[in-house]
Image (cartoon, helix red, strand yellow):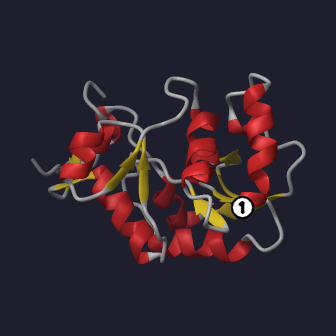
Amino acid sequence: MGRPKAFVEIDSRPMVVRVAAALTEAGAEPVVVIGGDSGRIESLLLRSEPDRFPGEGPLGGIVTALQVCSGAEAVAVVSCDLIAPSSTEIRTLVSELGSDDVVVPVVNDQPQWIHAVWSQRARAALEASFTEGIRAPRNAVDSLAVRRIDVVGWRATSYADADTPADLPDKLGT
């Protein structure tokens, strides 16, 4: 992207603010940004916590989120670079968790592990996998009860992220 994706603006709002707003609207409490430029994140009036495993891949971020939000039964982990985050989709995933350890949306046959809802029940197994050197969430869920939710049609746009400038909408805020 050439710059920190969290602060790229869409409709004059940084992507991280848009994601935090969707989480808040979905009923998430607290909303915590894991990793990144804490000073800049906090200047946007968002809570920031350092990634306890920086540079160690997405599983480290998920483990950090579960540890930081240890009082929450379920933790929605949502990447900061979603183009059109949806509080409705987040609420749907939370409502589907039940007795499962993780609910993962599946878009075009691809599980979206960094847009999933994780139960605290999964924490010990994820920590053990991380300690064993596993860094990809998909490789750490074999012992977990995983519920996959197929997301099709217009709902799939809620999971589109921006990896390059070409992924961004045509009209960006400044």
Judge by depth and name the residue closer to the eye, 147 or 48: 48
Count the labels in the image: 1
* Picture coordinates of residue 75, whole percent (x, y): 60, 61
State the residue at coordinates (23%, 59%).
45
Quarter of the figure that contains the N terminus? top left
Please identify the quarter of the rendering in which residue 76 is found: bottom right
Residue 102 can be seen, yes or no: no
Q: Is residue 172 left or right of residue 19?
A: left
Dot 1, crowdedness within 10 Å: few (<14), some or many (≥20)?
Answer: many
Judge by depth and name the residue closer to the eye, 60 or 151: 60
Q: Is residue 51 left or right of residue 5?
A: right
* Picture coordinates of residue 126, whole percent (x, y): 75, 42
* Picture coordinates of residue 131, whole percent (x, y): 75, 27
Residue lying at the far right in this picture: please name it: 143
Task: Answer above or below: position of 91 versus 107.
Answer: below
Task: Answer above or below: position of 134 versus 143.
Answer: above
Kind of element beneath mark 1: strand
Question: What residue does disc 1 label?
Answer: 119
State the residue at coordinates (72%, 63%).
149
State the residue at coordinates (49%, 27%).
54
Judge by depth and name the residue closer to the eye, 123 or 23: 123
Residue 43 can be seen, yes or no: yes
State the residue at coordinates (68%, 47%).
111
* Type of amino acid under label 1: Ser
* Picture coordinates of residue 112, whole percent (x, y): 62, 48
Q: Is residue 108 left or right of residue 161?
A: right
